[in-house]
Image: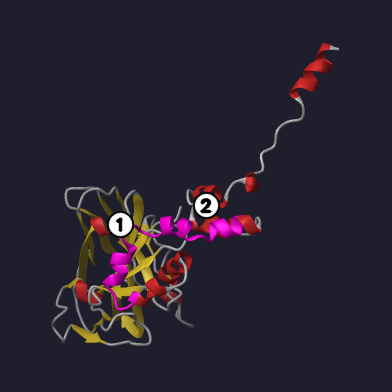
């Protein structure tokens, strides 16, 4: 009898319905997730959709200085888009040139973290100003920059770049990638691996070996098969924009200090003639996972 009375007092378990919350509360909750999650919750109900697509949510996903960054480009009309979500998607799908084409800026679509591509003109390329070694050409249908660097003929390969960590998103794991192409006549990149390093002055430096060659076996050339690379050797991957990329290293941007990030790629040993490589730049973007 006592148990029956206790059951009557307790009653059925209480189940909260989050959809009864005001739209502003739901927006606050969604803004604490991620852009990817915000898109997913749109399928829950029309109330969630309205909250997840609100300017309040996407304003938080955008970098705090996004308007100042856009103002440094010729694409300031982005700010006239009808919603913050459209501004976000535009910046993640369509990189913009800033600082007189000295950088390309875009957002990582899944996280909203800042990403940059430093053009070849902003890199330090050994003998890059000597026409017999490197040539500066225009590929308007392929590159976002006015010029790219084409390797004509060198025996020693050495490229480096630097940037301030203050322009990156804090508390973020980043990776640096060389963005390049190989002409059909390219050679000299299937030999010994190159050495890459990424890190800040006085901080931790990540080092690894990389192979820029594609190692594609031609018919009736079995002797050209290259053994699998050793562990920790980075290999190139095809990008959606038609370029190749190869990871040079990773680093964690703590934020709060203006450190100088240094990225280097050079040969371990000289002696191989190289030609047929085109450099668009070095891209810095968040790592996945």
Residue 23 is marked as none
Q: Is residue 66 visible?
A: yes
Q: Main secondary structure of the magenta part?
A: helix
- Residue 179 locus on image (x, y percent): 33, 72
Residue at image point 38% right, 87% down: 141
Is any atom of residue 118 visible in this view?
no
Q: Nearer the viewer, residue 233 or 62?
A: 62
Where residue 215 sits, quadrant-wise, is bottom left
Q: Which residues are magenta?
A: 48-76
How far, Cα to Cα, is label 2 from label 1? 44 Å
In the rendered view of the protein, which quadrant contains the N terminus?
Answer: top right
Q: Which residue is mark 1?
A: 208
Farthest residue, direction front: 22
Mark 2 falls on what kind of element?
Answer: helix
Q: Which mark is residue 27?
A: 2
SS for callout 1: strand
Q: Is residue 55 magenta?
A: yes
Instruction: Please provide percent x and percent y for residue 238.
Output: 44, 73
Neighbourhood count class around disc 2 (C-alpha, 10 Å): few under 14, some 14–19, many 20 upward: many
């Amino acid at each position: 009898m006592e148990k029956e009375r206790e059951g009557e007092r307790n009653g059925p378990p209480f189940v909260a319905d989050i959809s009864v919350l005001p739209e502003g509360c739901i927006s606050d909750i969604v803004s604490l997730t991620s852009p990817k999650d915000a898109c997913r919750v749109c399928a829950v109900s029309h109330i969630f959709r309205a909250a997840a697509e609100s300017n309040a949510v996407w304003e938080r996903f955008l970098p705090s200085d996004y308007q100042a960054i856009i103002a440094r480009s010729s694409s300031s009309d982005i700010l006239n888009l009808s919603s913050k979500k459209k501004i976000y998607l535009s910046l993640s799908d369509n990189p913009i040139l800033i600082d007189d084409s000295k950088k390309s800026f875009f957002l990582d679509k899944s996280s909203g973290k800042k990403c940059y591509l430093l053009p070849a003109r902003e890199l330090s390329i050994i003998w890059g100003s000597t026409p017999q070694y490197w040539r500066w050409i225009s590929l308007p249908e392929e590159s976002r920059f006015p010029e790219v660097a084409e390797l004509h003929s060198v025996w020693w390969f050495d490229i480096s770049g630097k940037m301030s960590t203050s322009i990156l998103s804090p508390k973020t794991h980043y990776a640096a990638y060389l963005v390049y192409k190989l002409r059909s006549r390219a050679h000299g990149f299937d030999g010994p691996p190159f050495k890459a390093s990424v890190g800040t002055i006085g901080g931790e430096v990540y080092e690894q070996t990389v192979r820029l060659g594609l190692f594609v076996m031609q018919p009736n050339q079995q002797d050209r098969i290259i053994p699998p690379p050793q562990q920790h050797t980075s290999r190139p991957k095809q990008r959606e924009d038609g370029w190749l990329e190869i990871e040079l290293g990773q680093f964690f941007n703590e934020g709060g200090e203006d450190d100088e990030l240094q990225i280097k790629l050079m040969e371990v040993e000289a002696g191989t003639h190289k030609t047929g490589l085109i450099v668009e730049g070095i891209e810095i973007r968040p790592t996945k996972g």
